[in-house]
Image: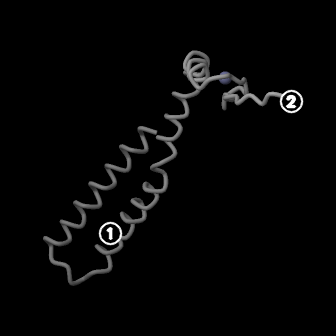
Amino acid sequence: MEEIKKTYKCKYCGETFDTPLELARHVRTKHKRAKAKEKIDAKRAAPTEEITKAIEAIGILKGLQQVSPHLNEGEKKMLADISKRMETLVMYIQRGK
Ligand SMILES: [Zn+2]
């Protein structure tokens, strides 16, 4: 009867190991950079949708200022301040990408 041995396969290069410990050691030594890059990529990809929504929200705020004749000066100023703050934040986030 053939012995079926459980192996642990490296997801980066496909090399197989007998124990999870050996695999972990291999990944740590051979693929440290790949793992670090994965983390950075995940960080970069995540906020794109949120930024798009924020830009849309800024557009809505600006539209409100223009189409609302009932707003008093204080309210207009508040809307302007909020959209300015959001714009600054979005610019800051996009620059960091
Ligand atoms: Zn590997």
Q: Give the numbered dot on residue 30.
A: none
Q: Which residue is mark 1?
A: 61
Q: In the rendered image, which quarter contains the N terminus?
A: top right
Q: Amino acid at mark 2?
A: Met
- Residue 40, relative to residue 91: is it above or below? above
- Say if mark 2 contacts mark 1, CB within 8 Å: no
- Closer to us: 89 or 10: 10
Which residue position is annotated with label 2? 1
Q: What x and y, as percent, mark residue 25? A: 56, 18
Name which of mark 2 and mark 1 comes first in the sequence: 2
State yes or no: Cβ of the residue under disc 2 lies below 8 Å from any atom of ligand 1.
Answer: no
Between residues 77 and 31, which one lies in front from this camera angle? Answer: 31
Residue at the top extreme, as displayed:
29
* Residue at position x 69%, y 29% in the image: 9
Q: CA distance from mark 2 to mark 1?
A: 73 Å
Three-letter amino acid code at the position of disc 1: Leu
Residue 89 vs 5, above or below: the answer is below
The single residue placed furthest to the bottom in the displayed view is 70
Residue 23 placement, left or right of 60: right
Residue furthest toward the right? Answer: 1
State ligand 1's quadrant: top right
